[in-house]
Image: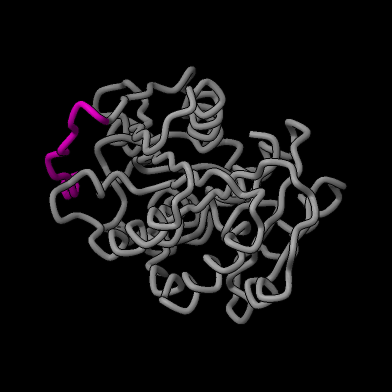
Amino acid sequence: MDKAMIFGIYDFVSFQMGRALLNMGLEVIGIHINENNHTPYLEEKRLEVGRNANFREILLSELDTCREVDTTETTLILSLYDLYMLREETIFQKQTVTKLQQFIEGNKSVTDIVFLLPIQLLVPDGANSLRTVINEVVAWGKNNQFYYLPAIYGPWQPSTYTFQQALLANMDDSEIRVNKREWTGDILYVDDAVEAILVSNENLAVEDNRHFLIESGLENYWVQCAAQLKLETKEIYLKKLDINQTISRVTVKKVTPFSESFEKQIEMTRRLI
């Protein structure tokens, strides 16, 4: 990957992907999609990446008039995981798909698409709201890579996620409502997940439509982490995964200890509120 374009740059996992790529010295173009909605910590996120000379933001509404003159091969990173967890799949309506497709067709430097997807897509009939979108994007004829993610936590996590709710509840006694879209069979610290994705992508042979499941390799790890937060784990929302031979299982290189990683999330939250 020489250059990246990230759809939904200020969403949770997308933002962490962008930060990691910028830290590696790559050029990143971020597409901001929630132009009229409130994006948590938007200005703070802009300050975080905007000081990097390799970062440029494009509004979704500006794609019609945007043309890239740089011929550097570019990877589009499309985090449907973020949209699914935020229940904002409707952002990817037909008009948005068409707008993005026209931009990609007009900028031939975009050669690859990396999908970041919820693990629920590996459950029969799971996350059906995303399947049409995926099929439409695959039809664009680019090289596609698919990464399936379990629950993800870490700094900048939205309050719709269970662990962020638990953190906030310790601060203000607010109610914790488990997000039923959050996979409770496994969990990854966002930095560990991003590193595993980037390393596996860098090592890929030139082959289209590769599928990867990113996992901790630890048994019942979500439950273990939840227990440290004293979360009730009686109700967990698990279904059997349908993992065939075409899906490669990738264990993260390291699992950052929960005590260390969650402390970083606490520190970030305290700084932002």
Figure quadrant of the C terminus: bottom right
- Residue 97: x %, y % from top left: 47, 70
Identified at 15% across, 38% down, the residue is 242
Name above or below for residue 214 compared with residue 131: above
Q: Is residue 36 left or right of residue 133?
A: right
Residue 249 sits inside the magenta stretch: no
Q: Which secondary structure is most common in the magenta stretch?
A: loop
Residue 235 sits inside the magenta stretch: yes
Tell me the magenta residue range: 233-246
Along the viewing direction, whichever of 130 and 259 lies nearer the viewer: 130
- Residue 113: x %, y % from top left: 50, 46
Q: Is residue 116 left or right of residue 266?
A: left
Identified at 59% across, 60% down, the residue is 104
Identified at 63% across, 72% down, the residue is 60
**Visible residue check, residue 8:** yes
**Visible residue check, residue 256:** no
Colour scheme = one colour
Identified at 39% across, 68% down, the residue is 89
Along the viewing direction, whichever of 129 and 251 lies nearer the viewer: 129
Name above or below for residue 85 compared with residue 151: below
